[in-house]
């Protein structure tokens, strides 16, 4: 069901809600800002690719419960995981831009927020990069993709075989998923899972091309130190992320993306 008005009409809890604007659109999902009278909500509806990517919508709800209670994620107000429909409370504020991750004070705020996130009790599914990589490779159906997935599985086996912490990780902390509020709030938790916090850090460093000083500010704000061992571990997780993200981009790139304006708090 792709018509948002038909979706709203099928959800008794959203009776009377009106569509303000579309926030995003693509093969994985689409989202709209709704006015529900006493609150503004974000309605997300899965597209055809969501199920094929193996996204765990029930696990996502468990994560949202934890992070919203902690004040660093949006509140889920209604969900139908089987159909891939989710309504969360709208978070007002501006999305961060890439330049916000060049500012020392901003990076340190982000590190402290990550420290808060990673101190929460574990919730949601266990992150398994090897399994995810093979799901992506099956969608692509090429020998090159399979070899890349095997590489991800091997690297993940070495990294996650260590007796490191298992914590809630966002796993997709691009600047657009960081909302400027006090404290910072993270949105779009669909890839969240319990895993090693260095993966969260690696996503931020790799996606935003952070320099050595910027990486040091992040590590020091997050952990209070920036040792050679920490930098080495972060680099190893960065290489793992590069490969997993490369497979994801290949899968998503095979399908047309419907562009829509991105609005604050989506």
Image (cartoon, rainbow, N blue to C red):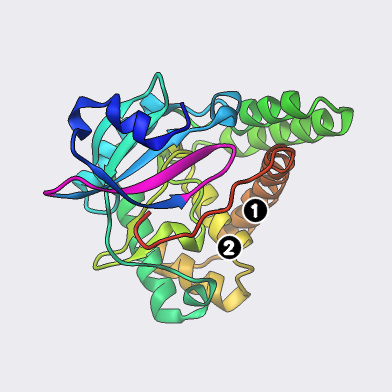
Is 94 located above or below residue 143 in the figure?
A: below
Question: Which residue shows up at 59% across the image and 66% down it?
Answer: 208
Q: Residue 18: in sight, yes or no?
A: yes
Residue 59 magenta-highlighted: no
Q: Which residues are magenta?
A: 24-38
In the image, 238: left or right of 142? left
Q: Quadrant of the C terminus?
A: bottom left
Q: Residue at x 42, y 27 (%)?
A: 84
Q: Which residue in the protein does label 1 denote?
A: 238
Residue holding disc 2: 205
The answer for how far apart the CA atoms under marks 2 and 1 are is 8 Å
The residue nearer to you, when weighing 61 against 148, is 61
User: Which numbered tag is attached to residue 73?
Assistant: none
- Residue 124 visible: no
The correct choice, above or below, for 98 with respect to 9 in the image is: below
Tell me the element at label 1: helix
Q: Residue at x 27, y 62 (%)?
A: 92
| CB atoms of marks 2 and 1 within 8 Å | yes
């Amino acid at each position: 069901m792709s018509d948002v008005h038909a979706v709203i009409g099928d959800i008794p809890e959203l009776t009377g809600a009106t569509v303000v604007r579309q926030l995003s659109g693509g093969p994985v999902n689409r989202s709209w800002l709704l006015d529900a009278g006493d609150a503004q909500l974000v309605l997300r509806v899965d597209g055809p690719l969501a199920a094929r990517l193996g996204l765990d919508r029930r696990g996502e709800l468990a994560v949202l419960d934890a992070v919203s209670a902690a004040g660093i994620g949006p509140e889920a107000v209604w969900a139908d995981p089987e159909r891939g429909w989710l309504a969360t409370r709208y978070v007002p504020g501006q999305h961060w831009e890439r330049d916000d991750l060049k500012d020392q004070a901003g990076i340190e705020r982000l590190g402290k927020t990550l420290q808060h996130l990673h101190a929460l009790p574990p919730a949601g599914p266990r992150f398994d990069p090897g399994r995810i990589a093979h799901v992506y490779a099956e969608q692509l159906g090429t020998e090159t993709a399979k070899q890349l997935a095997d590489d991800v599985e091997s690297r993940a086996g070495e990294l996650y075989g260590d007796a490191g912490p298992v914590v809630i990780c966002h796993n997709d902390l691009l600047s657009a998923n960081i909302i400027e509020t006090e404290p910072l709030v993270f949105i779009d938790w669909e890839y969240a899972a319990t895993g090693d916090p260095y993966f969260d850090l690696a996503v931020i460093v790799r996606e935003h091309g952070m320099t050595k000083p910027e990486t040091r500010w992040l590590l020091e704000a997050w952990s209070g130190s920036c040792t050679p061992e920490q930098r080495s571990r972060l680099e190893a997780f960065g290489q793992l992320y590069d490969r997993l993200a490369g497979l994801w981009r290949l899968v998503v790139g095979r399908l047309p993306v419907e562009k829509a304006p991105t609005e604050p708090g989506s």
